[in-house]
Amino acid sequence: MRDALTLGGNHAVLTRANPLAKFAAVFLITLVLALSIDWVSASVALVAELALFPLAGLTLRLLWQRGWPLIIAAAVGGWSTAIVAADSGAVLLDVGIWSISEGSLQLGLGFMLRGLAIALPAILLMTCTDPTDLADALAQKARLPHRFVLGTLAAMRLVGLLAEEWQTIGMARRARGVGSHGGPLERLRATLGQGFGLLVQAIRRASRLAVTMEARGFGTGHRTWARESTYSVLDAWVVLGGVLIAAAAVVAAAGMGTWNFVWR
């Protein structure tokens, strides 16, 4: 069964779109968000992205499971920016060693929303894209070298396996009484040991996969394709959606006077 069906649902619309079209839409949105530091354009893009999640079969629960490190990182980055940024406008909070003003709060909020707006399309893209379809599109449409394409395919396949390996190693260690008790230091040491075990497993699996692919002649000679990568009307709508979201973010920020180029 395809990864896209497992993660995104059998009837999710975006799972049927060509991966390159989805990459193009994500690139357009990310490009606009990278040009300005303001909360309006990021908010517009974020709301539009959340509205598209049902089309990929995603829920808020699955979003948290897949992207909680990015969500926490965006929140911490926004808070840190609000603290260290230069004060401008009225001071809202002053505890002596640091303060937050209206200007620094807007800047921190812009960084946080922008981080989320850039991270969510990546989560959406990886959730509703089958690695095999992506490899077919990269090789047939983008004309990338076969070795690069196969390496990308192998990496995407291994990401899901690593998550399963982490759970398996954790259950095995808990069955032996490792990491299931003790103080914070003992639990941290157990987590680091589990991470090292996962690293060893990843290296072994990658080595076996590389040897197997080389033995079967991957990346050499003329290749044929079991499935042809094609474009459809849906792909045009996907790219158009990316254009509209990017344009709406720029127009809204410019209209409210918050558009702020990063190099200013």
Image (cartoon, rainbow, N blue to C red):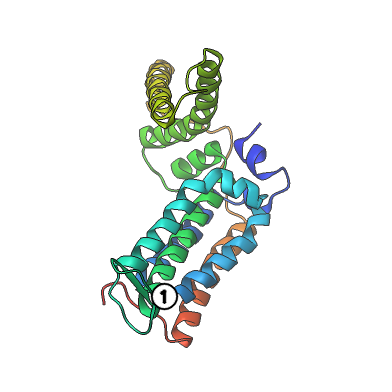
In the displayed structure image, the side of residue 59 where residue 157 appears, left or right: left
Element carrying mark 1: helix
Q: Considering only vertical position in the picture, is 147 above or below 232?
A: above
Quarter of the figure with residue 95:
bottom left
The percent coordinates of residue 178 (x first, y second) are 48, 18
Residue drawn at the location 43% of the way across and 48% of the way down: 142
Number of dots carrying numbers: 1
For disc 1, the neighbor class at 10 Å (few under 14, some 14 to 19, many from 20) is: many
The percent coordinates of residue 46 (x first, y second) are 54, 65
Image quadrant in which the N terminus is located: top right
Q: Which residue is mark 1?
A: 106
Q: Considering only vertical position in the picture, is 194 above or below 52?
A: above
Residue 126 seen anywhere in this rendered image of the structure:
no
In the displayed structure image, the side of residue 20 where residue 258 appears, left or right: left
The percent coordinates of residue 209 (x first, y second) are 43, 20
**31 or 160, which lies in front?**
160
Image quadrant in which the C terminus is located: bottom left
**142 or 25, which lies in front?**
25
